[in-house]
Amino acid sequence: MEELGSSDQKASGKREREEFHVALKIPSGDTPYVRAKHAQLVQKDPEAAIVLFWKAINAGDRVDSALKDMAVVMKQLDRSEEAIEAVKSFRGLCSRQSQESLDNVLIDLFKKCGEVEEQIELLKRKLRQIYQGEIFNGKPTKTARSHGKKFQVSVKQETSRLLGNLGWAYMQKPNYMAAEVVYKKAQMIDPDANKACNLSLCLIKQGRHDEACAILDDVLRGKIPGSNDHKPRRRAEELLLEVRSRRPQPDISDLLGLDIDDDFVKGIEKLMNEWAPSRSKRLPIFEEISSFRDQLTC
C-alpha cells in the first residue's frame, strides 16, 4: 500500500510539473534551452537567461528559438545593439523557416536603436520577397502569435503591416512624401485607423491640411476599420485640433527626394495589380510621383 501511495504521489507530481510547463509555455526537460526559459519566465532572471540561451546556441539546442528569445530578452535589457550583432552572426545556424521571424526581430531591434536606414532596407527586402512570391514559404497564410494567442495572417495583411512599418521609418528620417506614398499603398491593401492617422500626419507636415482633415474626419466618423478603438480616435482628435489651430508651412526639404527606387515601386504596383486586376495599371499616387519627378527635372 505504501509503494502504491508513493507511486501515486510521483504520478501526481509529474502531472503538476507538466501542467506548470504548459501554463508558462516552458518545454520539459533539462537542456540549456529549457533552463534558459525557466530562468526567463519562472526565476525572472534575464541575465541568467541570456547566459543559458548562449549555451543553447553553442550546443545546437533549439537554436531557432534560443536566438530569437535571447534577442528579445536583450532588447528588454536595453542591449539591442548586442542583440542585432547576435542575430546577424548566428542566424546562419537557424533553419530556413525561422528566417522570417528573425527578420521581424531585427526590424524591432533596428527601430529600438534608431537605425532607420537598416530598418528601411530590411523592410524593402521583405516587401520584394512578397511580390516575388517568396514569403510564407510559398503559402497564402502563416500562423502568428501575439500575447500568447495564435492567429492566421494573410499575405495582404502582412504586406500592409510591412508597408506601415516602412512608412513609419520614412517618417523618422524625416521624409514625409515617401511616407505618404507608402501609407497610401498600405491603406489600399488593408486599411486601419492607426495608419490613417500616420498618413494624415504626413500630409500635415507637407502643409496639405484639407487632405489631412478629410482622413481624420473619416476616422472620427467610423469609416475606417479600427476607428472605434480608443487610441486612434484620441490621436485623430488631437491631430485635428493641431491642424485647425495652426497651419505650418511645408518643409521644402521633405519634397526634394522621394527615396523610393523605381524597381521597388514597380514591384509593389505589380503585386497590387494582381490583387485588383480591374484597376488602372498605373496607380494614381505613382502618376503624381512621376509628375513631381518631371517637375524636379525641369
Image (cartoon, rainbow, N blue to C red):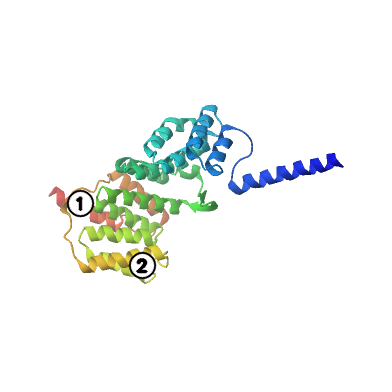
Left of 185 or right of it: where is 73? right
Q: Which mark is residue 44?
A: none
Q: Which residue is mark 1?
A: 254
- Of 48 and 93, the residue lying toward us: 48
- Of 4 and 24, the residue lying toward us: 4
Q: Would you call the spot at circle 1 few (<14 residues within 10 Å), some (14-19), or many (20 or more)?
A: some
Question: In this rendering, does residue 124 appear at all?
Answer: no
Residue appearing at x 28%, y 64% in the figure: 239
Amino acid type for the residue under numbered disc 1: Asp
Query: Which sits earlier in the primary sequence, circle 2 or circle 1?
Result: 2
Amino acid type for the residue under numbered disc 2: Val
Residue 230 occupies which quadrant of the picture? bottom left
Q: Would you call the spot at circle 2 few (<14 residues within 10 Å), some (14-19), or many (20 or more)?
A: many
Left of 148 or right of it: where is 207? left
Residue appearing at x 50%, y 42% in the figure: 137
> Quadrant location of the N terminus?
top right
Classify mark 2: helix, strand or loop.
helix
The picture places residue 92, in percent across and down from the top left corner, at 46, 30
Question: In this rendering, does residue 217 appear at all?
Answer: yes
Q: Which residue is mark 2?
A: 219
As measured in the structure, the alpha-carbon distance from the residue carrying label 2 to the one carrying label 1 is 26 Å
Q: Is residue 18 above or below residue 67?
A: below
Report the residue that reaches farthest toward the top. 58
The picture places residue 134, in percent across and down from the top left corner, at 45, 42
The picture places residue 211, in percent across and down from the top left corner, at 26, 65
- Of 61 and 77, the residue lying toward us: 77
Q: Is residue 188 above or below residue 110?
A: below
Report the residue that reaches farthest toward the right. 1
